[in-house]
Amino acid sequence: MTSDLYHRRIIEAAKRAREQGRLAAAEVTVTRDNPLCGDRITLDLRLEDGRIAALGHRTRGCLLTEAAAAILTERAPGTSPETLRRAHRDLRRLLAGEEGDPVWPELAVFRPVVEVKSRHECVLLPFEAVEEALAAASGEAS
Amino acid sequence: MTSDLYHRRIIEAAKRAREQGRLAAAEVTVTRDNPLCGDRITLDLRLEDGRIAALGHRTRGCLLTEAAAAILTERAPGTSPETLRRAHRDLRRLLAGEEGDPVWPELAVFRPVVEVKSRHECVLLPFEAVEEALAAASGEAS
Amino acid sequence: MSLDVAALRRSFPIFSRQPPPFHYLDNAATGQICAAAAEALTAYETAGRANVKRGVYRLADRATSAFAEARARIARYLGAAGPEEVILTSGTTFGLNLAAHVLEERVRAGDTILISRLEHHSNIVPWQMLAKRRGARLRALDVTADGRLDLAGLDAGIDRRTRIVALTHCSNVTGAVTDLAPIAARAREVGAVLVVDGAQRVPHGPLEVTTLGCDLYALSGHKMFGATGAGALWVRGELLAELPPFLGGGEMITRVTIEETAYAPPPHRFEAGTPPIGPALAMGAAAAWLAELDWRAIAAHEKTLTARLLEGLDRLPGVRIHGPRDLEARYGVVAFEVEGVHAHDVCQILDGFGVCTRGGHHCAQPLMEAFGTVATVRASLAPYNEEADIDALLEGLERVIRILR
Amino acid sequence: MSLDVAALRRSFPIFSRQPPPFHYLDNAATGQICAAAAEALTAYETAGRANVKRGVYRLADRATSAFAEARARIARYLGAAGPEEVILTSGTTFGLNLAAHVLEERVRAGDTILISRLEHHSNIVPWQMLAKRRGARLRALDVTADGRLDLAGLDAGIDRRTRIVALTHCSNVTGAVTDLAPIAARAREVGAVLVVDGAQRVPHGPLEVTTLGCDLYALSGHKMFGATGAGALWVRGELLAELPPFLGGGEMITRVTIEETAYAPPPHRFEAGTPPIGPALAMGAAAAWLAELDWRAIAAHEKTLTARLLEGLDRLPGVRIHGPRDLEARYGVVAFEVEGVHAHDVCQILDGFGVCTRGGHHCAQPLMEAFGTVATVRASLAPYNEEADIDALLEGLERVIRILR
Ligand SMILES: Cc1ncc(COP(=O)(O)O)c(C=O)c1O
Ligand SMILES: Cc1ncc(COP(=O)(O)O)c(C=O)c1O
């Protein structure tokens, strides 16, 4: 049943996303749209010593996008770009139906989305935004 | 069987068509193409006192077009435009599968064509050409 | 006489093939295929296939005749003056683009083309592109707060520079039906061509297209219970005779040399290449089958269901309907929002109840903007829908509201 | 290993549905649908129908995935670098017209477009129209007496002003296969885009399109044993990314306002409106099924039959073949004339023997002119043909000659 998608942990994560705000002092800001529905995330990133210092965002999106943004925002600070990319890759694998635990166990909440391909983009949107922000930051740095 | 189309009387009529020639002194000449195959009839008409005095033609076409041109050319001289139009109408009806004898009994040779709609145009081409010639002649007269 | 919905449902193969619960309420996106269309499609593709228009062997001859008959059936369903007024296309979008290309020469720099904010992207983008190619201006009629075309702007919107007016007959979002008569009258006054997007009107019964006052009318087979892949564009005969071809290729010519081409008469001039034969036969079969239904009974049935849906939505907290309330001014295409809940989340949860609805901008972003939103949920009805479909939707929505708001 | 033709024939529903004698030799006009394609078509249209690309309910999600998978299957059959290089169309003719429109901006007044006298009208008329729109010149390579592309004119035909070269991969009249390598090399030298009409090549086995040296490649599903109504246009990724859209409408946009539109990335940018979903799924299923066949065995089989046909025709009095004799330079598309007998009369009598062939200009009037004729008879082979088909044709021809010459 696709309503399994909307279990308590996803709903709660989405609620937390609404309380997370933008960063006051962002190093990079990117905006990314979901072509399926026009949903949009504006994501702020600050790096320190090559690690993610802080993330902020404003998300106009569905619960899945919000929940993904929340988990990302909670988990990323303090990690390296590599870990973040790894989390993104693990999330893609999880959505593709592959076995194995993602580096951030919370991402397992998205397992019921595997069957609904048209919603994968919703879950991935915040991760694509942060990758874009990282690329922009390293571009600026170099 | 569609090879019934090619019974002796049609083949003979087509042969006669190849011996019929153009008119030396035509009043009107029209050329008409069959869009299906690029076949072409060039038809000459001469009227006298409102009746068909003579028909001539050069036909580059299939047996069905040739046979129709032959019957038309043999039958038309001496008749009125009305009779000719009637023969055309009877031929259309015959091809549509309707009962009844055409004003020119020879047209019954085309009965096996009823089933092959894509060839109706082949049979009708000479009659359409003569109607066009008649229309042109009356246009010139007025 | 009331409609025997159970009997009608038996004429649609999907209802015996999808496991229950199956409440299909996405008919504005695509209708389900009727048995007559499915049979025509399958019989042609698997047992009678030959290319059309040129072969003389019996299989080809029969395919050609069937194709001509499909055109005639669609012409009769539309109320065209004859089959030669009907161009067979691959769908509404193609038909509207074809229209925008064959009408191109009538548009000069500084001329205007009038559309509306109610349009589907397929009736916006082709005109935008045409306006750009010709240096013309694109104007748009507004919509009323309840999602109908606002005719107040008609006189100002159409003037002597207006060459083309292109409007939808029925909105694919709000279900609002356009009153074409005053628009046609105004277009005629200034000599503008009136193009109508009939995609959403055609599934609701036969037409008398020649009395609508329009010049072109586009439709899709898949939305009128035919197969995907075919559509039609009706063009008034006198206009059609004057129009240049659009695409070039086989079947639309009388003579080709490397230097130049002589084009076939309409409608063939506008049909380049092998047509979508199977889908066109299916569309013809659907048109013939639809023409025999009791549309008075169907209209009453659809109205009853639409009323039940609108009333049910009204009773739910935080649900806002976009669209007219007057059942005489609309068909059963109902867009709404659930406050604080994203349209896709609504649709996904409804799917858990076997209810198929659509969420998003419905290819009508200017309308979404006019409504001040990005996405809505849409439930759209067909003759085969029944009360159980509406009730399942409403029940699902209660659940949505309980868990997500 | 030799081909088990009887087994192959069981994979094509028509052979159990048409009463014998049924000798289908009009494959260049349209192939018969294979069971895999018919099943994909019917399953989607009657049991799984939903519109693609936007719905989130399971039925729509599955349709969307199936549509993406069809694209991927076609991409694999063609040997494309990826599915995003494949635009799903309604057929070859549409694909070539699309090409002529999206390449329009590359052609300036005085530039040249090179085609050949061997082309199907669908690969002539769109370029003629483009040349006219842009004030460019259309040139045509000649054909040899035996109906092959005459490459002698290549160096003179392609020069610095040549922007587009558009040629067939296999003639639909003579069966001649074009040696694309020298053409691609010459086109590359001058920076011209090479468009290939693959309609007749594609039914004869998988390709490595990226190694052909061309930039665009058009094909039809119905000729490769899919359904009518779908086709594809492959475009080299780097080129595709640069090209503007052609038709406007739903699904090809990212954002629409009345004033302007932002277009989706390829391939969606080139696919406006509801695609021919069922026919595209059928084409994908056909591609996947074809990819698994033993093409070495099929090629040998087709060659044997082609040789039998050519030799048989040679033995008949007054029969003249148009096309190359070298079996390595051609496929089994064989055009011929019976002296003194009209092509349609030949085909009609053959039909009496259950033999389906095509008579006429085959949408290749410039080639007919080069041959000094108006119409020929054409027999065209598919993997499912067998010796009995050839023999029935030859027997029928004997009869034709007996009664009509
Ligand atoms: C060589 C060639 N090109 C183009 C076409 C056009 O294909 P379609 O009619 O499927 O668009 C055909 C088929 O008729 C063909 O044989
Ligand atoms: C009002 C309207 N116009 C045009 C279209 C486009 O139709 P199609 O996608 O069949 O080309 C649609 C359907 O999506 C529609 O609802």
Image (tube, coloured by chain):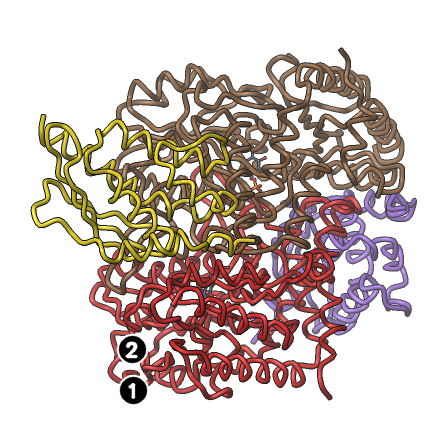
Chain colours: A purple, B yellow, C brown, D red
For residue B124, which numbered disc appears in the image? none
- Secondary element under disc 1, as helix, strand or loop, is helix
Left or right: C262 in relation to A35: left
Quadrant showing the C terminus of chain D = bottom left
The kind of residue tagged 2 is: Asp
Q: Which subunit holds the residue at mark 2?
A: D
Respond whether the residues carrying marks 2 and 1 are from the same subunit. yes
Left or right: D280 in relation to C95: right
Dot 2 and dot 1 residues touching (CB under 8 Å)? yes
Name the residue tied to disc 2: D142
Name the spot of residue A125 as percent of width and height, x first.
70, 55
The kind of residue tagged 1 is: Ala
Name the spot of residue D197 as percent of width and height, x first.
45, 69
For residue D152, which numbered disc appears in the image? 1
- Asked if ligand 1 lies within 8 A of label 2, the reply is no
- Secondary element under disc 2, as helix, strand or loop, is loop
Q: Residue at x 70, y 69 (%)?
A: D288
Query: Dot 1 surroundings within 10 Å: few (below 14), some, or many (20 or more)?
Result: few
Can you say whether B79 is above or below B8 in the image? above
The reply to whether residue D269 is visible in this rendering is no
Name the spot of residue B126 as percent of width and height, x first.
29, 44
